[in-house]
Amino acid sequence: MKLDIRHVTHYDYSAPLQYALQSLCLTPQANAHQTVLDWSLSAPGQLFAQRDAFGNLAHTWSLRQRAYRGAVRAAGVVRTHASPLLVDDRIPPAFYLRATPLTHAAGPLAALGLEHLDGPVDEARALALALAVADRIAYEGGRTSTRTTAAEALALGAGVCQDQAHVFIAACRAAGVPARYVSGYFHAPDAPDLASHAWVDVCVDPDARRWLSVDITHRCLMDERHVRLAVGPDYAACSPIRGVREGGGDETMRVEVGIRVLPDHAPSEADPATAVLTAQEP
């Protein structure tokens, strides 16, 4: 599937912004699941690229001037392939057994993992755990925040894709199975609010460093509707945008994500190496 993606985050401030620093995980990379045909990224300040600790291509920018508004824009074309299995040898899978504040597992979370992952991890067991999590965490916006832990989401019984991913990850780690958070995009023309999405990778073969991608919200394996952006131990480690600011008063943020399918004959498939990074005023 050939997907055209447009993602804009607008910021407005009630008072002059004096300083801002942001880190962006908004650049997809080529892998067995996807080919990046074209990609651009822009921000109010100059972008500096670096490879983060988890192998993601991240960019930082800073602003040292008075401003009342700004925008971060990401756009491009990605061809996806139906390949939920990936090999990633950048970090030993055992690293993803460590608990984080958002994925600490105890009590019901540990029991959930041990119930469904009582043997070698395969597609059937991973999907069974995903279904169990989706049944326990009803998809409901506005009930949780980016600071909600897996234990809190499980007790509440509601949340969004981020919460479902954290519960799944915590359950896996409690059972001794490496698992990690995945941020990205999902093509859902009938549910545009799900365009910015999160799911999980579970390690099915630590020796070969093979990972299986599972979408808890949609109760399926990763397929052609998914575009991967970044991975990490949890949301806090690989959120699309994070940062700090000084001044600005009250902040209003508006996010627009649009995804459409392009026909295969649409021009032109740029070489992956031609992805453009620019810095511009919004």
Image (tube, helix red, strand yellow):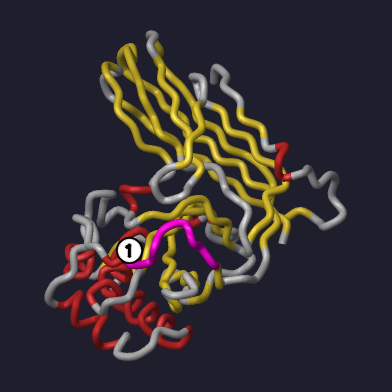
**Residue type at tag 1:** Tyr
Q: What stretch is highlighted in magenta?
A: 87-96
Which residue in the structure is indicated by mark 1?
96
Indicate whether residue 89 is drawn in magenta.
Answer: yes
Farthest bottom residue in view: 119
Asked whether, in this view, residue 146 is left or right of residue 203, the answer is left
Q: Which quadrant holds residue 168?
A: bottom left
Nearer to the camera, 82 or 232: 232
Number of residues whose C-alpha sits closer than 10 Å to that of mark 1, classed few (under 14), some (14–19) or many (20 or more): many
Is residue 76 one of those drawn in magenta? no
Across and down, in percent, residue 101 comes to 19, 55
Image location (x, y in percent) of residue 86: 55, 68
Q: Observer-nearest residue: 93 or 241?
A: 93
At 12% from the left and 76% from the top, the residue drawn is 107
- Which residue is nearer to you in this view: 71 or 44? 44
Callout 1 secondary element: helix
**Whether residue 195 is situated above or below residue 104 in the rendered picture:** above
- The residue lying at 37 percent from left, 63 percent from top is 180
Residue 221, placed above or below residue 38: below
| Residue 194 x/y as whole percent | 49, 57
